[in-house]
Amino acid sequence: MAEFTKLIHKYLRHDKKFPHVWCPGCGNGIFLGALIRAIDRTGFEKDQIVIVSGIGCSGRISVYVDFNTLHTTHGRALTFATGIKLANPKLQVIVIMGDGDATAIGGNHFIHAARRNLNITAIVVNNSIYGMTGGQYSPTTPYGATATTALYGNIEHAFSIAELAAMAGASMVARGTVYHANLLDELIEKAIVKRGFAVVEVISHCHTQYGRRNRMGGAVDMLRWQKESAVKIDKAQTMTAEELTGKFTIGVLEDRDLPVYTHEYNKIRDAAKAMLAKAG
């Protein structure tokens, strides 16, 4: 506890920005703890880190952490992050998004950032709902679940964020939960040091907007659901499809080495410079 208190004073703007705005029991607090522990393990200095966030409950994280931070518009966090990374590739850019922020209004940005394989860490906090703006259903709201915009049940099928990222070309894709906090620390740390576009989907909960409306109980009940529903990837490989029904896998789901966009971009830039010098 004493060690974590040191991290709080080192990495959080605790003197001006707290208390936070999240509901009591929200998973964002657990995720915030995992984030600063992971960053501390990487050994990067605070000035080497840039945290970019969009709009939503998780977007508030950029206000609370004491790094270079940018709180951007809805769905556009990755576009701002792209500009930062291209302007200064030495910076470690971490993007925090919600499920609606990343895969609804920001869906095309998410797909193409993965396709380009930008050297960016993208963390998507997935609570299956638009929690901050009133409980509307999002691209990850399960089929049949209710929301303020789906009073009789959602008739759309949910995205799998991790599978979408892997198919779009991300170098690393992982999924964790806020219940499995120690594993979440490790996954975020691996994603930060991975070269290329690294995605961590964080299964969280919104007991205020989603849990209450869908009769899943309070925060503790929803954390218990994460514990019971999550299966580590190595165990999942020994289970049948029937046994995995209603479950989801956690751990590193994809890890590969692909050409990094900033490196390829610099090669084009250097070739253009050489051509101009020769012509001059």
Image (spheres, rainbow, N blue to C red):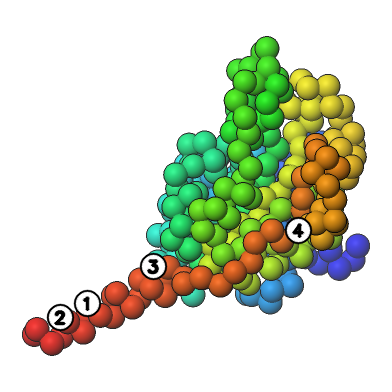
Q: Which mark is residue 87?
A: 3
Residue appearing at x 76%, y 58% in the figure? 251
Q: Secondary structure at mark 3?
A: helix
Secondary structure of residue under mark 1: helix
Label 2 with label 1: CB-CB less than 8 Å = yes
Find residue 215 and report its horizontal and vertical position in percent: 83, 22
Tell me where residue 101 sits by quadrant: top right
- What amino acid does circle 4 point to? Gly
Across and down, in percent, residue 78 comes to 48, 52
Q: Position of residue 149 (x, y in %)?
A: 60, 18
The residue to which callout 4 is attached is 251
Mark sitting earlier along the chain (3/2):
3
Q: Give the Cα distance between marks 3 and 4.
A: 32 Å
Which residue is the site of mark 1?
A: 272
Mark before the other along the chain sequence, 2 or 4:
4
Question: Which residue is at the far left?
Answer: 280
Q: Give the quarter of the figure containing the N terminus.
A: bottom right
Gap in angstroms between the C-alphas marked 3 and 2: 21 Å
